[in-house]
Amino acid sequence: MSFHGTSGTGKNFVSDFVAQALYQKGIESNYVHKYTADIIIFDELVMNQFSLAAGIKKAIKDCPYSLFIFDEIEKLKPGVFDAIVNLLDHHSSLKGYDFSKAIFIFLSNSAGTEIAVKLKSITDSGRFRDETTLVDFERIAELGAYNVVGGLQDSKLIESHVIDHFVPFLPLEQRHVEQCIKKEFNKICHRSTSDKIISDIMKAAVTFDETHVYSNNGCKRLSKKVEAYCYMNT
């Protein structure tokens, strides 16, 4: 799967939720392998190549049901994933390795702007955000991943159709951001909060687009703001 959307719309949250649903230790499981752009770029500079395929093979040998998460792939060089195309093929079985049971999730901000523009067009036509479907956005996410500079640009992963789903993450409305703040208060402060505090944190951490409907940064930065508030008010 490939997750696409602007920053703070929940891509990491959902990928972590998948890990939590699959493994007892969730994201901390030895069978969850999360690669960030910074790690991959660092290894490229040090080694002149990143042995991604070898790392995946080793993980699959340890557990065929492994989960691989690649974050911020828009920061990577085009073609970085071409070496693993055959590993993602549903019918791939290479020298005793069975890759068909593993899950690969790619996270990217690419196509986020295009998804936001499409959503505005849909809502301007009279439909509500909650009435949209995957069909409205999936092709936009796929084209954005393929055409925008990054790890999936002109990628053989897309050309070979080994990515099953391009999942759009839509811009968040104020009500969604408020839910994020409430969740962070329960998680960090271990208590609920008031509408005034929610409003204060919104003003400090969130900006909205020109329509004043959608958050520019989703729920990003909220946890730090809530953490700071809890620290100063305990």
Image (tube, rainbow, N blue to C red):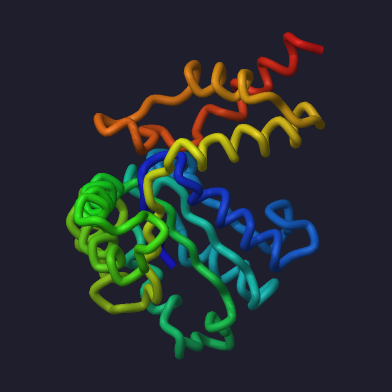
Q: Name the residue nearer the viewer: 149 or 195.
A: 195
Q: Give me the residue at 40% from left, 54% from top.
A: 169
**Relative to 45, is 34 on the left or the right?**
right
Looking at the picture, tell me which residue is in the foreground, 167 or 77: 167
Where 52 sits versus 218, above or below? below
The residue depicted at 56 percent of the width and 35 percent of the height is 178
Residue at far top of view: 232
Side (left or right) of 60 relative to 177: right
Looking at the image, residue 159 sits to the left or right of residue 80; the answer is left
**Rendered location of residue 132, percent (x, y):** 35, 63
Number of numbered tags placed on the structure image: 0
Q: In this rendered view, identify the residue nearer to me: 178 or 150.
A: 178
Kindly identify the residue that appears in the image at 53 percent across and 83 percent down.
100
Residue 96 figure quarter: bottom right
| Residue 152 percent coordinates (x, y) | 29, 58
Rendering coords of residue 33 (x, y %): 60, 57
In which quadrant will I find the C terminus?
top right
Residue 64 in the image, given as x and y percentages of width and height: 64, 77
181 relative to 43, above or below: above
Q: Is residue 78 visible?
A: no
State which quarter of the image contains the N terminus.
bottom left
Q: Is residue 64 above or below residue 207?
A: below
Does residue 217 appear in this view? yes
Q: Identify which residue is drawn at 57% across, 75% down.
A: 102
